[in-house]
Amino acid sequence: MSSVGEFALIDRLKKFQTRGASVVLGIGDDTAVLELDRLRYQLFTTDMLVEEVHFTRAMPPKRVGHKAMACSVSDIAAMGGVPTVAVISIGVPKDLSTKYIEQVYAGMNACARAFGVSIVGGDTVKADKFIINVALLGEVEKKYLVTRVGAKPGDKIFVTGKLGGSLSSGRHLTFTPRLKEARFLVEHFKPTAMMDISDGVAGDLRHILKASGVGALIDVEKIPCHKNVTLDQALTDGEDFELLFTLPFTRARKLVEYTKIHPEWQFIEAGTVSSMSGKIQMKDKAGVVRSFHLTAFTHF
Ligand SMILES: [Mg+2]
């Protein structure tokens, strides 16, 4: 499995997709997009956390529960939508106490309440490791849907907050999905492309570039790094769960002006979309441009 890699595996599995008339977007974005009614799309996403891969039993169970729900909420936000309904399935090892599982559910419950999600069912099975799967529905007004396709040369690249060190600092267990920010953006600034940063900004940016058929010039100095985080870590660490989005020049200028007056909103401009398809270039302090090769966080 590790010899194939996650994205190569997903590519191979794509051919087994089935698509009815309601499918607008299948595999390949933050969520699937389905017809709902004249004005809205249904969004559908699922995320699985596995003990020893995504969390350990030494971590506070409430926070593990929070993470399980929050990473799905983040994917709905990345499409410009709002989350609605979840089902939760768990695989439970013999030695796990009911109390521990209840704590995990308390974490999911608190996150669900905070973001207006109804938890309506699920499944429980025996397993060797503790596994949590959250499948989440959401909705988005058709006019507000944002996918990974649509970034154009000249667009400005933004992120919604500081990057890097999420796993080592524990932030990956406590992060706030950027739902409020995403809704603000789709309602007032209409991003041309958007996704959430789960595998490191450099790797995830590549997904937008590939989907949109463009490249990027990143202003290294402007990449917002968390405390005690190197630039490399900010670019390649996984699980930041900030949003990465692009805006045409004029709207980008307006957003930058807006955030000057409203510093409670964090939208940080960090680069420009280029016409060099699939290529990421880095401009350093001295203005020297180099092409960038990454080793992003991999799941396997
Ligand atoms: Mg995502």
Image (cartoon, rainbow, N blue to C red):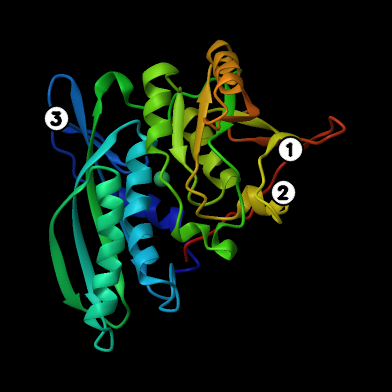
Is residue 16 in sight in this rendering?
no
Q: Quadrant of ligand 1?
A: top left
Distance in Å between CA atoms under marks 2 and 1:
8 Å
Q: Quadrant of residue 29?
A: top left
The residue positioned 48% from the left and 68% from the top of the image is 2
Residue for badge 1: 220
Amino acid under disc 3:
Leu
Q: Are marks 2 and 1 in contact (CB under 8 Å)?
A: yes
Is residue 25 in sight in this rendering?
yes
x, y (%) of residue 146? 37, 27
Q: Are marks 3 and 2 in contact (CB under 8 Å)?
A: no
Q: Which mark is residue 231?
A: 2
Ranked by sequence position, the earlier of labels 1 and 3 is: 3
Distance in Å between CA atoms under marks 1 and 3:
41 Å
Does the Cβ of the disc 3 residue fall within 8 Å of ligand 1? no
Query: SS at mark 3?
Result: loop
Q: Are marks 1 and 3 in contact (CB under 8 Å)?
A: no
Q: Which mark is residue 36?
A: 3
Viewer-nearest of labels 3 and 2? 2
